[in-house]
Amino acid sequence: MTVFSKQNQEDLIKLNDLNQSFDLIDLNSAKNISSNKKFDMLVFYSDYNQSINQSILNGYLNCLKAKKFEGLVGILKVPGGAFELPLLTSKIIRKYNPKICLVIGCIIKGETQHYEFLSSTVINAIRNVSFENEIPILNGILTVDNEQQAIDRAGKRMDKGSEFASASLELMNFINKFDV
């Protein structure tokens, strides 16, 4: 697990006070959530490189709040890294049938080819899960060369979480407009 310096931690996004217009359920701590629950959005994030993934999630939730989204959002921290996300995402999607999903992870290049194989495999698997379940899944997997690139993209500099939230809202409008 990557540990960032205090300065780098300050570049990451904190969760604003969530007195939000949408309902938020943390599936990791919720008890007895019915599979009949109608989630608009489900957000999955891996616990590997957690501070990066949490920053993206925080940016996402902050943006939904700022844009006054109304609906039901579920979040789920998935044990493991990016490789585990597609399968576990597929299982949870089948259980709850959300309108859209976001899958968040971070793959930082190392000194071997593992990065290339992992990145390609995970992204293709997420695409397959989307097609198999007929649910749009936003690819929130950062594939970066180094820790600073991850911090820049997940943090205040580029705020990918906010971008993913805006894209989610556009997709939600499209889905609702065409009833698909």
Image (spheres, rainbow, N blue to C red):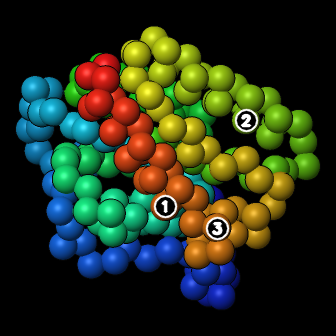
Left or right position of 17 against 90 = left
| Residue at screen point 83% across, 55% down | 145
Residue ID for mark 1:
162
Q: How packed is label 2: few (under 14 Cα within 10 Å), some, or many (20 or more)?
A: many
Q: Please state which amino acid type lies under the numbered disc 2.
A: Ser
Residue ID for mark 3:
158
Q: Residue 147: in sight, yes or no? A: no
Q: Establish if 8 lies above or below 150.
A: below
Disc on res. 119: 2
Q: Please state which amino acid type lies under the numbered disc 3.
A: Met
Left or right position of 108 against 18 = right
Nearer the observer: mark 3 or 2; the answer is: 3
Quadrant containing the N terminus is: bottom right
Q: Earlier in the sequence, mark 3 or mark 2?
A: 2
Q: How packed is label 3: few (under 14 Cα within 10 Å), some, or many (20 or more)?
A: some
Distance (Cα) linking label 3 and label 2: 21 Å
